């Protein structure tokens, strides 16, 4: 999947090309801002930029401050009051305040930390960069901040340090190349997921029905074992067939996937629960399954059901 948030990688590339680089990170903003807290902008000493910290209303001022920071090697904590007019111009309903932290790479953010961050991101590791107040130490951590990592939420800690969360790209493994999947897979991709389709039946999982998508013609348990199941993965089961759904479901219940959804009626799910109980799964483990899958929005037809599934998946991701 092409990453939309590859600012650390760009910053490291620039650094290796002999440029001086600063990273600007959104640390606080109005509620309806176009960029979330944790969004980043890379600025080179030549004035090149990648990424953004707003809808365009403060980028120019941030770049000017970043160039000064590159000259003196000191961090900056910038605060901008955004007028109602400026806010409206970038598509917001109201004005507010945006705070941006600028860190020159090298003098403030160690090059070794940036290199370690880029390597961790390539390996799909969940990590955080902790920036102490002012010119205090910057470090990459792999343990702690579980709630922030789970909710994908950067922010300030009580001690005044700022935690920038770096999670792997989201994945959605869809078991069952059925009609709903034809709508769900492209929707998931638009929402930022890397969708993977699993179905051992060639007639279902064909490139004609799913053009351009990655399709694994494996048994679901073998597929999820090869792909791996982590806390940035959602599993959606759509086959109605216990021979296909249950092996993948059991693997998911023993993993850290953040969402498990299974298609089927209330009666179908009751039979599923009974099978899982016979296999030794606890009520708490089984309760992780969202079934019947999707938010109850009165969906009719495959496309509307796909909308309800994706909405429920995002709700669990963002709200827990």
Image (cartoon, rainbow, N blue to C red):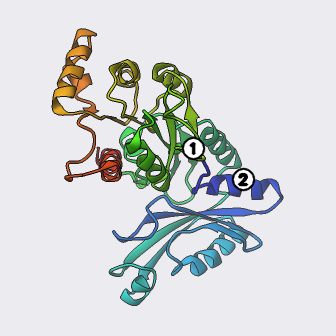
Q: In the image, what residue occupies the spot 44% across and 61% down?
A: 37
Residues marked 1 and 2 touching at CB (< 8 Å): no
Neighbor class of circle 1 (other Cα within 10 Å; few <14, some 14-19, many 20+) is few
- Looking at this view, is 296 or 304 the one in front? 304
- Identify the image quadrant of the C terminus: top left
Is residue 121 toward the left or the right of residue 290 in the image?
right
Give residue 305's position: percent from left, percent from top. 30, 48
- Provide the residue designation for mark 1: 208
**Location of residue 40 in the rendering, given as x and y in whole percent from the top left corner:** 56, 62
Front position among marks 1 and 2: 1
The residue at the far right in this view is: 18
Is residue 257 found left or right of 200 in the rendered image? left
Indicate which disc, 1 or 2, sits on the residue closer to the N terminus: 2
Q: Splitting the image into 4 quarters, where does residue 41 fall?
A: bottom right
Q: Residues within 10 Å of mark 2 (few under 14, many from 20)?
A: many
The residues bearing labels 1 and 2 have C-alpha atoms spaced at a distance of 40 Å
Residue 122 versus residue 44 in the image, above or below: above
Please tell me which residue is depicted at 27% across the width and 30% down the height of the picture: 288
Q: Position of residue 228 (x, y in %)?
A: 52, 27
Is 314 positioned to the left or the right of 140 in the image? left
* Residue at the spot of label 2: 12
């Amino acid at each position: 999947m092409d990453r939309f948030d590859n600012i650390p990688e760009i910053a490291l590339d620039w650094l290796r090309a002999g440029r001086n680089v600063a990273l600007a990170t959104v640390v606080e903003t109005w509620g309806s801002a176009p960029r979330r807290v944790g969004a980043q902008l890379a600025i080179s000493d030549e004035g090149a930029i990648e990424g953004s910290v707003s809808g365009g209303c403060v980028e120019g001022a941030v770049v000017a401050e970043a160039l000064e920071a590159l000259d003196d090697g000191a961090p900056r904590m910038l605060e901008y009051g955004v007028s109602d007019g400026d806010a409206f111009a970038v598509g917001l309903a109201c004005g507010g305040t945006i705070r941006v932290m600028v860190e020159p790479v090298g003098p403030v953010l160690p090059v070794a930390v940036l290199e370690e961050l880029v390597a961790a991101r390539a390996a799909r590791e969940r990590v955080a960069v902790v920036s102490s107040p002012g010119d205090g130490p910057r470090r990459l951590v792999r343990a702690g901040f579980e709630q922030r990592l789970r909710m994908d939420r950067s922010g300030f800690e009580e001690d005044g340090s700022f935690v920038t969360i770096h999670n792997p790209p989201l994945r959605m493994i869809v078991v069952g190349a059925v009609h709903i999947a034809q709508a769900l897979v492209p929707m998931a991709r638009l929402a930022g997921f890397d969708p993977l389709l699993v179905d051992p039946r060639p007639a279902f999982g064909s490139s004609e029905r799913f053009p351009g998508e990655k399709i694994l013609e494996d048994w679901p348990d073998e597929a999820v074992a090869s792909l791996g199941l982590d806390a940035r993965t959602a599993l959606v089961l759509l086959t109605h067939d216990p021979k296909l759904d249950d092996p993948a479901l059991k693997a998911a219940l023993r993993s850290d996937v953040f969402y498990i959804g299974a298609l089927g009626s209330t009666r179908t799910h009751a039979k599923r629960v009974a099978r899982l109980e016979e296999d030794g799964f606890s009520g708490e483990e089984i309760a992780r399954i969202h079934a019947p899958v999707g938010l109850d929005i009165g969906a009719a037809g495959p496309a509307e059901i796909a909308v309800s599934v994706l909405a429920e998946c995002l709700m669990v991701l963002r709200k827990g």
